[in-house]
């Protein structure tokens, strides 16, 4: 019988508080000396957290060789999230994705990968110097949202590439579309392959029966979660959960010591400890309260509002996380970028925008007053922009393009169209950029309008959500070119592009 864990405890946090309260003379890093040297003029804000911003002292354990309070905190986290073992991450889910991939794959190895993954997955493939077979996600035609990959596509990919080391998928999507991963996991396990899940936006799933099932509950071998995104940990606080014996946990720990700082942040780790305690003890209650408020808002918007939250039609086999609200203008007058701008002018900060949606991320601690402010701001937008021609502004479109904007729906749809040209790709080799340059491969800069059919020499990453539209070495499909043109017209934020305005692109001069 499994040992019953006491989730009222927060062992790491409690030890830090006890240690900080002692009278002592410290002759060790960090240089702020437990807050005594807090930056001048900012002491009031920084000193309290600096008091527990300590280092790997014998009583405080060591993240990279945990034997004491950190190990105890990670054990409690594994119990709360339904894992066999949990690693604390102080470099966000990025560190977990890098370690997961490198623990499974080496140079020349093959991994089956969902195409609309976060850029950190592509970087992991580069660091591992491995190959990938990409699976295009299914796109819901009504909303334009990515629905992830189906088990039958995973089955076909594993049949065609039996040498693959495993399968990596994203669930839920950035927009909150989530699926029951059990069919994918069962398909991979039937062939002896592990399943890795980027579950960065699904850390809360484990704590409420009305939310989608978590990756661990579906039998995944490893899952990375950003506790700072949907729970209440500090920024960069994340966890890597593993179960079963398909992954080498000792190797995972070694790799995490390589990709994370050798001086991990104790405040971030303590926030993970407290986050676990909060949700293990009060998570279902807190989430229920917030979900009830959010349901009320969604109902009112659907019944009365011009600005509505996207809902997946029945029959998709997917559900939308209620804590993600992708708002759109039902009249098609304001695109997502302009909607986000106008909401910002009214004191509403959104997570991101795309050609159709302004995406809002809610959580268990979202105040009712914030939802009321949102509804009032949307009422003001209805008055400020009565039905008529599209409003001018960032990302606005001419009347002639209005139908095209509606057809392209969302950034997710634009990416999906670009990926769908090749539902299951041929194996792609990934080398670090320096090695590509060292090979003497020449590049040329050409107008984006002329790039279809050429090989991209740079990664183009709309950010957020951080999903590469193109990776280095990818053949540019006409749908990807069209998505680039639309992103440039909308002046969308992108990373990796040498031309931030997306008028030109670097391609390999082959």
Image (tube, rainbow, N blue to C red):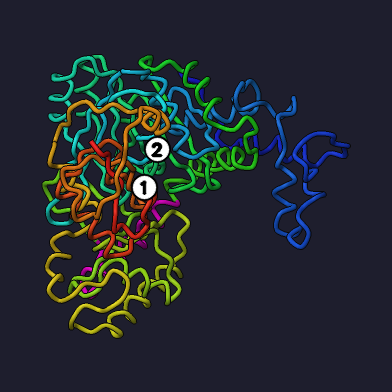
Measuring 18% from the left and 52% from the top, which residue is drawn there?
450
Which contiguous range is marked in magenta?
Answer: 286-309
Q: Label 2's element?
A: helix
Is 260 included in the stretch rendered in magenta?
A: no
Is tag 2's residue or tag 1's residue first in the polypeptide sequence?
A: 2
**Position of residue 141 measured from the top left corner of the image (x, y, whole percent):** 12, 53
Magenta-highlighted stretch: main secondary structure? helix
Measuring 77% from the left and 52% from the top, which residue is drawn there?
38
- Give me the C-alpha separation between circle 2 and circle 1: 8 Å
Quadrant of residue 424 within the rendered picture:
top left
Asked whether 406 or 461 is in front, the reply is 461
- Mark 2 and mark 1 in contact? Answer it, CB < 8 Å: yes
* Mark 1 residue crowding within 10 angstroms, few (<14) / some (14–19) / many (20+): some
Asked whether 197 or 91 is in front, the reply is 91
Left/right of residue 29 with respect to residue 119 in the rendered view: right
**Position of residue 325 measured from the top left corner of the image (x, y, whole percent):** 31, 59
Q: Which residue is mark 2?
A: 120
* Quadrant occupied by the N terminus: top left
Quadrant of residue 134 within the rendered picture:
top left
The circle on residue 50 is none
- Looking at the image, is 65 positioned above or below residue 310? above
**How many marks can you see?**
2
Left/right of residue 32 with respect to residue 466 in the rendered view: right
**Position of residue 500 measured from the top left corner of the image (x, y, whole percent):** 37, 57
Is 300 included in the stretch rendered in magenta?
A: yes
* Mark 2 residue crowding within 10 angstroms, few (<14) / some (14–19) / many (20+): some
* Quadrant occupied by the C terminus: top left
Q: Label 1's element?
A: loop
- Looking at the image, is 434 positioned above or below residue 172? above
Measuring 63% from the left and 20% from the top, which residue is drawn there?
67
Q: Which residue is mark 1?
A: 466
């Amino acid at each position: 019988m499994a040992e019953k864990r006491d989730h009222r405890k927060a062992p790491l946090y409690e030890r830090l508080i006890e240690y900080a309260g002692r009278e002592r003379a410290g002759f060790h890093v960090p240089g702020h000396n437990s807050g005594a040297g807090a930056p001048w003029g900012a002491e009031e804000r920084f000193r309290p957290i600096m008091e527990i911003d300590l280092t790997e002292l014998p009583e405080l354990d060591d993240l990279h060789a945990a034997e004491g309070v950190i190990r105890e905190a990670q054990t409690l986290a594994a119990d709360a999230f339904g894992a066999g073992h949990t690693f604390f991450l102080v470099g966000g889910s990025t560190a977990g994705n890098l370690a997961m991939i490198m623990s499974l794959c080496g140079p020349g190895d093959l991994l089956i990968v969902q195409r609309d993954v976060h850029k950190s997955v592509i970087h992991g493939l580069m660091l591992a110097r491995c190959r990938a077979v990409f699976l295009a996600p299914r796109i819901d035609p009504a909303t334009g949202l990515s629905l992830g990959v189906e088990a039958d596509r995973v089955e076909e990919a594993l049949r065609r590439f039996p040498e693959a080391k495993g399968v990596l998928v994203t669930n839920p999507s950035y927009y909150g579309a989530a699926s029951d991963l059990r069919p994918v996991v069962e398909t991979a396990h039937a062939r002896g392959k592990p399943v890795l899940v980027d579950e960065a936006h699904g850390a809360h799933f484990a704590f409420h029966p009305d939310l989608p099932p978590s990756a661990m509950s579906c039998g995944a071998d490893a899952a990375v979660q950003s506790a700072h995104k949907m729970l209440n940990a500090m920024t960069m606080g994340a966890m890597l959960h593993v179960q079963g014996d398909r992954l080498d946990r000792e190797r995972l720990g070694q790799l995490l010591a390589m990709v994370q700082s050798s001086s991990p942040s104790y405040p971030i780790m303590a926030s993970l400890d407290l986050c676990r305690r909060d949700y293990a003890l009060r998570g279902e209650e807190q989430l229920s309260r917030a979900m009830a408020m959010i349901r009320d808002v969604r109902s009112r918007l659907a019944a009365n509002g011009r600005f509505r939250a996207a809902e997946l039609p029945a029959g998709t086999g997917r559900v939308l996380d209620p804590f993600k609200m992708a708002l759109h203008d039902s009249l098609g007058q304001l695109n997502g970028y302009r909607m986000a701008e106008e909401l910002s002018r009214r004191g509403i900060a959104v997570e991101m925008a795309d050609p159709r949606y302004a995406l809002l991320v809610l959580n268990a601690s979202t105040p009712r007053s914030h939802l009321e402010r949102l509804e009032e701001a949307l009422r003001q937008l209805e008055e400020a922009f009565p039905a008529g021609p599209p409003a001018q502004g960032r990302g606005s479109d001419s009347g002639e393009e209005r139908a095209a904007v509606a057809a392209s729906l969302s950034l997710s749809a634009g990416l999906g169209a670009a990926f769908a040209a090749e539902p299951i790709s041929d194996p792609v080799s990934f080398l670090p950029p320096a090695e590509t340059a060292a090979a003497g491969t020449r590049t040329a800069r050409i107008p984006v309008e002329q790039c279809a059919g050429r090989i991209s020499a740079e990664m183009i990453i709309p950010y957020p959500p951080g999903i590469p539209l193109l990776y280095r070495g990818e053949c540019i499909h006409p749908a990807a070119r069209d998505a680039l043109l639309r992103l440039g017209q909308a002046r969308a934020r992108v990373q990796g592009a040498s031309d931030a305005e997306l008028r030109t692109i670097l391609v390999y001069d082959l």
